[in-house]
Amino acid sequence: MAEQLIVGTHDGVARLVLNQPHKLNAISFEMWQGIADALADFARDDAVRVVVVEGAPGDKPAFSAGADISQFADKRGDSDAIARYNRAVKAGEQALIDIAKPTIAKIHGYCVGGGLAVALCCDLRIASEDSRFGIPAAKLGLGYGLDALQPLVDLVGPSTAKEILFTAKRFTAAEALIMGLINRCVPSVQLDALVDDYTSTIAGNAPLTIKAAKQIIAQTLRDEATRDVALCTKLVDDCYTSGDYTEGRTAFMEKRKPVFGRG
């Protein structure tokens, strides 16, 4: 498992690397389990300000070409196995969605099927121009449930989601940018620098403000009757009663860069 998922932290940035380059970083059952465990560790680590998810480099660049289909006969061979597999996938994806810290999918190369699902669970997606995107379910006879499709529809809307699913085509990074699948698209030689710029910028901003923004935006996507208004109020109040708010105002008056993370 440790070989298939590389985890590390440095200067407030946590990195989760999908590491099966010989399989275009296809995601195994064990990796799905490991994603949830890694995110739980990141959530508990106060030093972590932002999380980057990426694929290990290989002969062919890939964020992830999807689920590791070579495991399906063993890991999805009967109804009990399928349920167990689906629980692991759900736990991994939900951990990415639920972590209060911002997440960035750093995409280089193929980002397909389950790999795209992982990217969609991240807050931001930054891709190289040579990346390719798609959901080939209609060519494999696979079905995606409500929970699996909700992030896609929330991001690109129902019509574009239908185009992606009905055609099962691979789309270029330029097309993905137009669709709203990704936030930024740059030449591959600039990808590292842009992601590093985003992570350093986010890591240097007030963590409680970012936490509030992430969770309140998530509430806006829910039906009005089910929104947790009390939670939203508390998140904003936490900002104003924090040391970060004092630090932000003081730094502004003193014309210096603020140092956040004091609670």
Image (spheres, rainbow, N blue to C red):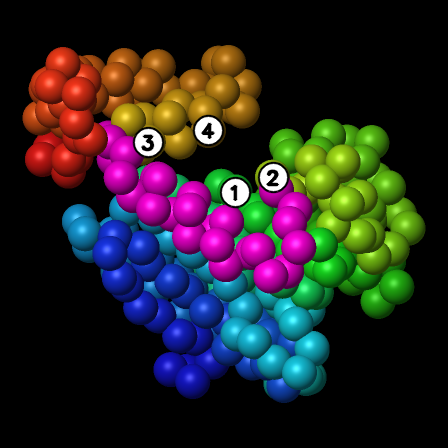
Outermost residue toward the front? 255
Find out whether the residues at labels 1 and 3 contact each other: C-beta distance under 8 Å: no
What residue is pinned by disc 2?
183
> Please, what is the dominant secondary structure of the magenta stretch?
helix
Q: Quadrant of the C terminus?
A: top left
Find out whether the residues at labels 4 and 2 contact each other: C-beta distance under 8 Å: no
Element on which disc 2 rests: loop
| Residue at 56% across, 56% down | 191
Look at the image and give the residue range highlighted in magenta.
Answer: 184-208
Element on which disc 4 rests: helix
Residue 187 vs residue 195: left or right?
Answer: right
Q: Earlier in the sequence, mark 4 or mark 3?
A: 3
What residue is pinned by disc 1?
124
What residue is pinned by disc 3?
210
* Residue 218 numbered mark, or none: 4
Compared with 162, 173 (above or below) is: below
| Viewer-proximal residue among 142 and 249 | 249
| Residue at 50% across, 71% down | 18
Quadrant hosting residue 63: bottom right
Q: Which of marks 2 and 1 is nearer the N terminus?
A: 1
